[in-house]
Amino acid sequence: MDGITLNLFALQLFTGLALGSVFVLLAVGLSLIFGLLTVVNFAHGAFYMVGAYVGVFVLGLTGNFWFTLAAVPVVVGSMGVVVERYLVRPLYGRGIDYPLLLTFGLGMALVEVVRIVYGLEGVPFDTPKELRGAVDLGFGFFPLYRLFLIGITTVLVMVLWLFIEKTSYGLVIRAGARDPEIVRVLGIDISKVWLIVFAIGTGVAGLAGVLSAPMRSVIPDMGSTVLVEAFVVTVVGGMGSLVGAVVAGLLVGVVVSMTSLFWPSLTDLSMFALMAAVLLVRPQGLFGKKGLMG
Amino acid sequence: MSEDTKNKTVSKGVSRRSLLKGVAAGGALAATGPFLFNIAQAAETSIKIGFPVPLTGPYGSEAKEQAACAQMAVDEFNAAGGLNGRMAKLLVRDDKLKSGEAATRTLELIEKDGADFIAGSLSASVQLAVNSVAKERGKIYVSISQSDAINEAKHFSKYTFHEAMNPHMTAGAVGRYVFPKKGKRVAFLIADYAYGHEMARGFKAAGEAFGIEVVAEVQHPLATKDFSTFLPRIQAARPDVLCLCNFGYDQMNSLKQSTNFGMKEQMQMVAPALLYNQRRAGGAEAYDGVIGGTNFYWGLEDTIASAKTFTDSYRKANNGKPPSDYGAYGYSGVGGLLKAVTAAGTTETDAVITAMENLKYDMYKGEQYYRKCDHQSVQSVYIIESKSEAKMANEYDVFDLVGVDKANEGVLRSCSDLGFG
């Protein structure tokens, strides 16, 4: 491989880390819902897509990107509330495949609804003016918007981590994940807790959707590849581990980036090869607890 | 002026038809058996054009436009009296963008529905499947989507006509416009499949005359979502021109993301097939300043009479919306075929083939004709540049016409290169 300078290598590595933070953003909502509710949310990609379309709609009304960014997780999270309350809740205690099939069907239905309303070919979503352009990092130019994504992902993960690990409400959530019956005996309304977790998970998926809109096309199918990427990250990191999702997201990003520099034709394959390798050595993923699926 | 006369013919045709219908109904009441038999026979001998296109799938909206434009051509033919009273009929089928599906639909169209001709398809590989069925059954097939392979001797038959431009001529035209103006250091981002490589080959062939230097050549898998990891290598090569040899959402995403990387300030972005609908879905910012090639842009109506006639009648039927590039192929493909039928005075296949080979037609963009050896439609390639949002007069006003590569056989791959004689 000729022409690979130190600068190019550094930029490629940094690109990988930035891509990794996008993967973290995509995966965190899925990981959260699985880790705390043991619900494998197959509608994750659809919520992500809905987030992008809600973003298009709100941005069209207000013209304000920042307001859109705040509104989308609220709207998609509220959808999550309805879905949890009326669709997912009746299936608790029936085994992991029931909500899996339900959300799988829900995802398909959402995609079709958007297709009917907005058509097949996608809608434009420009990068907000204040986040356009590239920044000189010393070893190469890098898009300001992607730097912004790294920042927002960091903040988001920190807030979620502090909320779950350091607040008393987070304590209830964690206790509910471990032994819901005891929590109920203690007089806590556990279904309300699950409702909130599901809402946060879908809200974050929606946020990821609207944040991806300026980079990837806003089309009804946009969620299908994201679902795959999010699952790879979640599985590599260990189902349900927030720390695992972060480490795995960055790792997948760097592996994909380096593969595309040296063996571009294997780029698509690289993340699955990584997943296979990790699962061979640690079937529960890097940071996963054993037996969560049981 | 021309619009008015046209409307008159259309309305005249319609009223004549409804008049005939009324007479027929009255006649059926009065007389009986033999009259009905005549009507049945007339219906049977209508000229049937089978039209398999991917109505469902990622190019569904393009396919629907193609079908609508093809129907326009059929309506105009019928309004002008058909072929001595024989009317044409378009049979649209969904090929789902799949080769197998397209082959089955084509076979049904020929065997069951009795199609006289086949036109359509919106994919390089699907059209080869349609072509192989059509040539096996000895029916004329007019392909209306881009492909280099269909020109080659191994796929060609006397029944095969390629109305769309091919990647070689499109990329070549764009290269001839861009290389002398924007520089000789050229980088390629290539979608790793036949169409991507065909476009890159077209650029390189055109670039030879200008002495271009290929400084980077990066291939990406089809349907890539995140291009960020492919871009540093291109940036590091410091090209003057970046040729995006990809299509559809790949083109849109790679443009969006390289714009974010600030690459437009460093190099000229070029996309051989710059599509109208794709540009509208991708937004002004991502496409701003990108130069590409097209078979048609509605802005041609200012300079070309046939383009004006075509866009006017399309607008009238579609709430003022102008037609798209790929939609227009449906009109020219079917319209050209029907012109040949008129010239031949029959639907007999060999006579129509001869008529098509001798046809000079101008449906919507200036004069075209089919080259003898490979039946490739020789036509002008228009060079367009995408406008910034500030310069757009309305939502349809997305491109500037900046150049034209005039219809010329010399820019095609030579007949001997394609494996003929």
Image (spheres, rainbow, N blue to C red):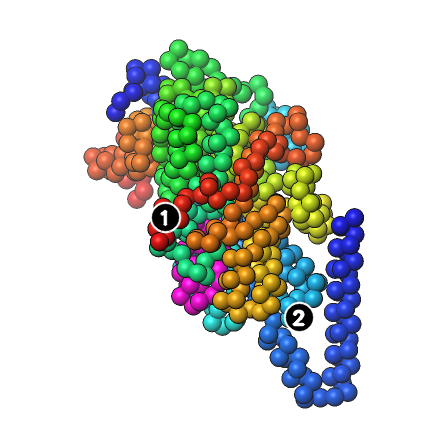
Q: Which residue is mark 1?
A: B416
Residue at x 54%, y 42% (from the top left corner): B407
Please tell me how crowded label 1 is: few (under 14), some (14-19), or many (20+) other residues with Cα within 10 Å: few
Q: Amino acid at mark 2?
A: Asn
Same-subunit check for callouts 2 and 1: yes
B54 vs B357, nearest the viewer: B357
B269 vs A135, nearest the viewer: B269
Magenta-drawn segment: B123-145
Q: Chain of mark 1?
A: B
Dot label at residue A67: none
B346 vs B399, nearest the viewer: B346
Residue B128 drawn in magenta: yes
Residue at x 25%, y 34% (from the top left corner): A278
Where is residue B334 drawn, in percent x and y?
58, 57
Relative to B210, B327 lies left or right: right
Residue sitting at the far top: A138
Q: Which residue is mark 2?
A: B84
Where is residue B8 drawn, in percent x and y?
79, 58
Q: Which of pointers 2 and 1 lies earlier in the amino acid sequence?
A: 2
Where is residue B71 drawn, in percent x and y?
63, 58
Residue B96 drawn in magenta: no
Q: Chain of mark 2?
A: B
Residue B214 in sight: yes
SS majority, magenta: helix
Relative to A32, A59 lies left or right: right
Real-space CA distance between mark 2 and mark 1, rounded to the nearest whole angstrom = 41 Å
* Element carrying mark 2: loop
Relative to A283, B280 lies left or right: right
